[in-house]
Amino acid sequence: MIIGVLVLNGLITLALEVLYLPTYLGTVAFPLSAVLAGVVNVLLVMGVRSVTHRIGAALLPLGAWTFGFLACSVTGPGGDIMLGSDWRTLLLLFCGLAPPLLYLYFRANAGLFSR
């Protein structure tokens, strides 16, 4: 039940991150939601890891987040697209996946790095 809520939360937070990705601070693009994506996804993975220690289960929120990202990157029925083809989209993808995957890597190999 908790894992399902965390997976759903991954999709909800992605919708908010995509919504606020094209924000500007004055005349400069300021994609703060891309940075927040990494923090939120690490917290989601940590939440799943507090319930179960299986790595596959901890990847479920990231899988839902990635599925939502891919769904937002294709054109809709009217030709609209939610994610543009620019550096902010790439930054969102990198910041959304790299920190939680690094967290899982270091947690899974904690014994290797403690020597």
Image (cartoon, helix red, strand yellow):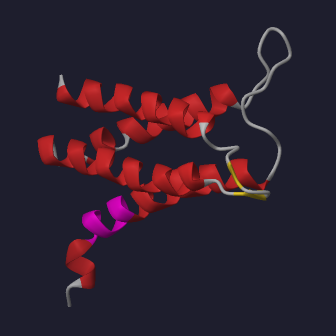
- Image quadrant assignment for residue 58: top left
- Of all residues, the one furthest to the front in this rendering is 26
The answer to whether residue 73 is above or below residue 105 is: above
Range of the magenta residues?
A: 103-109
Magenta: predominant secondary structure element? Answer: helix
Q: Residue at x 24, y 30 (%)?
A: 3
Q: Position of residue 65 (x, y in %)?
A: 49, 36
In the image, 19 versus 69, the foreground residue is 19
Outermost residue toward the top in this view: 77
Q: Is residue 107 above or below residue 62?
A: below
Where in the figure is residue 90, as x and y percent of width and height? 70, 53
Q: Among all residues in the image, which is located at the extreme left?
A: 51
Q: Residue at x 46, y 29 (%)?
A: 11
Please tell me whether residue 21 is drawn above or below residue 64 in the rendered image: below
Residue appearing at x 52%, y 51% in the figure:
96
Residue 34: x and y in percent read: 57, 52
The total of numbered circles placed on residues is 0
> Horizontally, is 75 left or right of 115 in the view?
right
Residue 88: where, in percent of width, then height? 72, 52
Task: Point out the image quarter for the N terminus.
Answer: top left
Residue 23 vertical position relative to residue 112 in the rendered view, above or below = above
In the image shown, does 12 or 59 lie closer to the viewer? 12
Residue lying farthest bottom? 115
Q: Is residue 91 left or right of residue 46?
A: right
Q: Is residue 104 magenta?
A: yes
- Is 83 magenta? The answer is no
In the displayed structure, does residue 72 sit left or right of residue 68?
A: right
